[in-house]
Amino acid sequence: MVSVDESISRLGEIDTGSSLSESERLRLSNALVAALRRVQSPWDIACSHGWIELTTIFAIKSLIDAGVFTKWAEQGSKPLTANEFAELTGADAVLLARLLRHLAAQHLITEVDEDKYASTPWALSLGTDLALSSIYGTFYHEIQVPLAASMPSFLKEIGFKNPTDVKDGNFQRVHGKNSTFFDFVASSPLRNKDFANAMDCHARGNISPWPEVYDTRNLTDGAKLDRPLVVDVGGSKGHDLEKFLDRHSDVLEGSLVLQDLPHVLEGLAINPAITICPHDFFKPQPVKGARAYYFHIVLHDWPDVQASEILRLTAEAMEPGYSKILIHEDVVSVRDPSVQATVADMTMMMCFSSAERTDQDWQRLISGIPGLQVSKIWRKPYTIGGIIEVDRII
Ligand SMILES: C[S@@+](CC[C@H](N)C(=O)[O-])C[C@H]1O[C@@H](n2cnc3c(N)ncnc32)[C@H](O)[C@@H]1O
């Protein structure tokens, strides 16, 4: 039997440095959560859900808005007292002390002396990465929370059936009949910006850059120069095409095409190698015979009926034997899926009545579209993201 002191001392020896690969880091983090669950009482867990998470988010958001994290980073992230934070930001020192203490109690920042706090990589990121800090903004408060709060009564109302109707789901229960997720996001510039930032963070944090998962030489080798190489469909601000350019900086101008709804692309300043093409993917694909149509966390937003329609319209634009569809998504393991995959699945349910898909779900969806066939599912070991490579065979 290992004593508590010895267990704590062993925990202090855990390697958290850069020597860990991403997959090792995730495995270790998962094992630590499992150990925490064994140590926590039922009350600890319920208290965390009912009080700690909620109050932590409001404390973080208030500290972001007061400018604490940005000013802290500007000052070199050195340890500061609540009074010093108050001088830096103009906020009340007593209030700041209370908010900071709540974060330190959860090891989000470190209390190094009475009311004096040292920064952590997370706190530094909130001060330097505005996309990350916007996760705590309208994305959380206006998009996620109202939908999550409504889910239990929505599921009860529909008799605990699996929701599959994007036009009559939890979203419409919260925002009204005929409302749609993307119209709601678009209807406020701040929400639109925070959502795009959240997608950027999700891409950076959860899914490996696609040229690291898929061998992009499959696209460049034998590419026909008279038409686009990659069309990023529903590509938001174009961060995935930038990743392609990092690897293939020599592609011809105009051979990369970024598509999304007009309001998303409006006023976008982007690498001149990328052509901007506003397009609704429920209309016929205007770019014909491209080498690849890339969809990154786009089809999971849609239940099978709509996802099939998007794929069918894409298939019509493809050149058989040449064009490919590349679908970059979480591919859910049927056994022991990670929380990154299950949280995405819950999010799809509450926002779109859709779901994250397993290998088999993808095979079934694609086999239902005339002319399309899955040629390979590309994965990096121990990551949740995969790329489903689809050919048009006839
Ligand atoms: C979950 S986001 C993914 C964005 C991007 N691919 C990424 O990985 O960050 C889904 C994207 O689909 C776009 N979208 C939604 N409905 C669309 C439609 N009918 N036509 C084209 N794009 C659409 C949204 O504007 C949004 O940028």
Image (spheres, grey):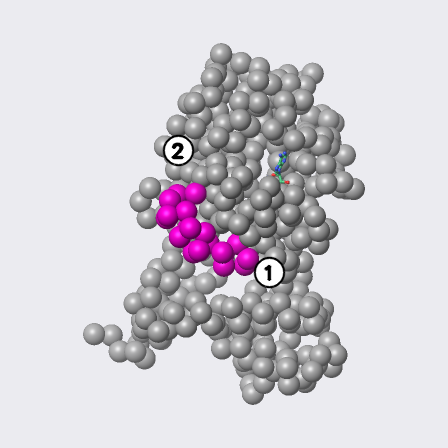
Give yes or no for contact between labels 2 and 1 (Cβ–Cβ under 8 Å). no
Residue 203 vs residue 11, the one in the foreground: 203
State the residue lying farthest toward the left: 1
Q: Position of residue 170 (x, y in %)?
A: 50, 48
Q: Is residue 148 magenta?
A: yes
When asked about the image quadrant of residue 297, the answer is top right
Residue 68 vs residue 148, the one in the foreground: 148
168 left or right, relative to 132: left
Examine the rendered structure and indicate whether residue 13 appears above or below residue 393. below
**Amino acid residing under circle 2:** Asp
Category of crowding for the residue at label 1, using alpha-carbon neighbours closer than 10 angstroms: few (below 14), some (14–19), many (at least 20) = some
Q: Which residue is mark 1?
A: 141
Secondary structure category for the residue under label 2: helix
Residues in magenta, as a range: 145-163
Q: Which residue is mark 2?
A: 361
**Amino acid residing under circle 1:** His
Picture residue at 37% right of the left edge, 69% below the top: 45
Q: Position of residue 87 (x, y in %)?
A: 74, 81
Picture residue at 59% right of the left edge, 72% below the top: 59
- The numbered mark, 2 or 1, whose residue comes first in the sequence reads 1
Examine the rendered structure and indicate whether residue 45 appears above or below residue 315. below
Picture residue at 62% right of the left edge, 67% below the top: 61
